[in-house]
Image (cartoon, rainbow, N blue to C red):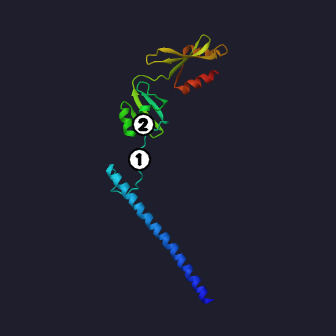
Amino acid sequence: MRNFLLIVTLICIFVVCGICGYYIYEAATKNEKNDDNMAELAKVAVENGVNTSTPSLLTSIVEEKVSPNANLIIKKHYKECGHTTKDYAEIPAELVNLKENEVKEKLSDWELKGFSANEVVILKEVTGICNEHFVLREKDGVIAIYTEDAEGNETLHELTEISTEYLTEQDREELQKGIKAIGKEALNSAIEDFE
């Protein structure tokens, strides 16, 4: 019986040592593969002009490209009034699959303010005032929205369906003088006051 227990004990020790040896071998092989991958990344980094003399964590060097589903955000800063407008558009086909530096070249008249695969933000400074200077007035019994240019000239933008018939005398006087609203949010807020 002692011999049987001794044999079972030796077999168990042998199996445990075999399993441990296997895992140690796998870990060493994995570290060698990681070292090879890191060496390859370092080589690519040096080829692309990345300074590898200081310790840093190397990551995959893949430049983002513009997705066909990306948004284009167009910002215009108007020098005269100091306002910046923001419009959204679909990405033009000629920008799809371009890298950041290629987009900068393609849109050289614009300043690239943001770049990712899903969003490109561009900015341009322009002279004059933005088209978001509004004046509310009464016209033909309803509230009319006018846009105002740099010289103060007004152009009819839209007639609302808000009747001036039931407004207070004070509101009608203000509309006669013209209620100014700068920006679409201010315009919407001014219109809501009359609804």
Circle 2 Cα neighbour tier, 10 Å, few/some/many (<14 / 14–19 / ≥20): few
**Where residue 88 appears, x then y in whole percent?**
49, 30
Q: To which residue does mark 2 refer?
A: 113
Q: CA distance from mark 2 to mark 1?
A: 20 Å
Give whichever of 74, 35 is nearer the camera: 35
- Residue 78 lies left or right of residue 47; in this view the side is right
**Local secondary structure at mark 1:** loop
Kind of residue at disc 1: Val
Query: Looking at this view, is 119 or 5 the one in front?
Result: 5
Side of 89 where 162 appears, left or right: right
Asked whether disc 2 touches disc 1, contact meaning CB atoms under 8 Å apart, the reply is no
Q: Position of residue 125 (x, y in %)?
A: 39, 28
What label sits on residue 177 in the rendered view? none
Question: Percent x, y for residue 117?
Answer: 46, 40
Looking at the image, is mark 2 or mark 1 nearer the viewer?
1
Query: Which amino acid does the dot numbered 2 rest on?
Result: Lys
**Left/right of residue 166 with respect to residue 79 in the rendered view:** right
Residue drawn at x 50%, y 69% is 23
- Which numbered disc flags the more N-terminal residue, 2 or 1? 1
Q: Quadrant of residue 41?
A: bottom left
Residue at the far right in the pictured view = 166
Q: Secondary structure at mark 2?
A: strand
Residue 74 lies, in percent from the top left, at: 45, 31
39 or 169: nearer the viewer:
39
Q: Residues within 10 Å of mark 1 (few under 14, many from 20)?
A: few
Quarter of the figure with the N terminus: bottom right
Q: Classify residue 144 by image quadrant.
A: top right
Residue at 59% x, 26% y: name it: 189
Q: Please name the residue that numbered disc 1 is placed on.
A: 62
| Camera-nearest residue between 51 and 124 | 51
